[in-house]
Amino acid sequence: MKLTCDELDVLLPEFLDGTLTQDQEGAAAEHLATCDQCRLQVSELEGVGDLYRRHGKLTLPDDARQRIRNALGVDKE
């Protein structure tokens, strides 16, 4: 099974989670072996995942949250 860039894009969450079927995993690996653009995208997404795992969920101070809400025109609930 050969994948296009768009088809791989749909499978990326499962690819990064390691939950693809064996056939899908092989097709993704085959595509990535020949596609610089998709390899870059996977690398960037892995980097985001690494940052999240290292730093966890970050929270903004209340004043920063309120400034953002004000800038977006959203009233505080």
Image (cartoon, helix red, strand yellow):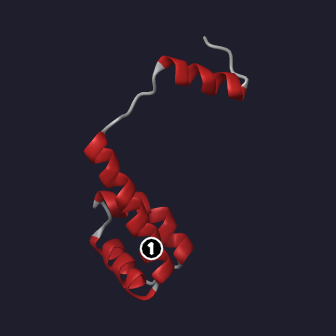
Q: Quadrant of the N terminus?
A: bottom left
Q: Quadrant of the C terminus?
A: top right
Element marked by disc 1: helix
Residue 4 is left or right of residue 32, and the answer is: right
In the image, farthest residue toward the bottom:
34
Q: In the image, residue 11 lies at what x, y percent? A: 44, 64
Residue 28 is left or right of residue 76, and the answer is: left
Q: In the image, residue 72 lies at what x, y percent? A: 70, 28
From the image, tell me which residue sits under label 1: 40
Determine crowd level at label 1: few under 14, some 14-19, many 20+ residues with C-alpha closer than 10 A: few
Above or below, 70 against 23 in this view is: above
Q: In the image, residue 35 lies at what x, y percent? A: 47, 84
Query: Total number of numbered labels?
Result: 1
Query: Residue visible at 52% across and 71% down?
Result: 7
Query: Residue visible at 41% across and 68% down?
Result: 42
Residue 58 is left or right of residue 18, and the answer is: right
Choose between 34 and 26: the one closer to the eye: 34
Residue 3 in sight from this viewpoint: no
Choose between 15 and 75: the one closer to the eye: 75
Name the image quarter holding residue 58.
top left
Choose between 59 and 2: the one closer to the eye: 59
Above or below, 35 against 53 in this view is: below
Above or below, 39 against 59 in this view is: below
Query: Residue visible at 42% across and 82% down?
Result: 31
In the image, farthest residue toward the top:
77
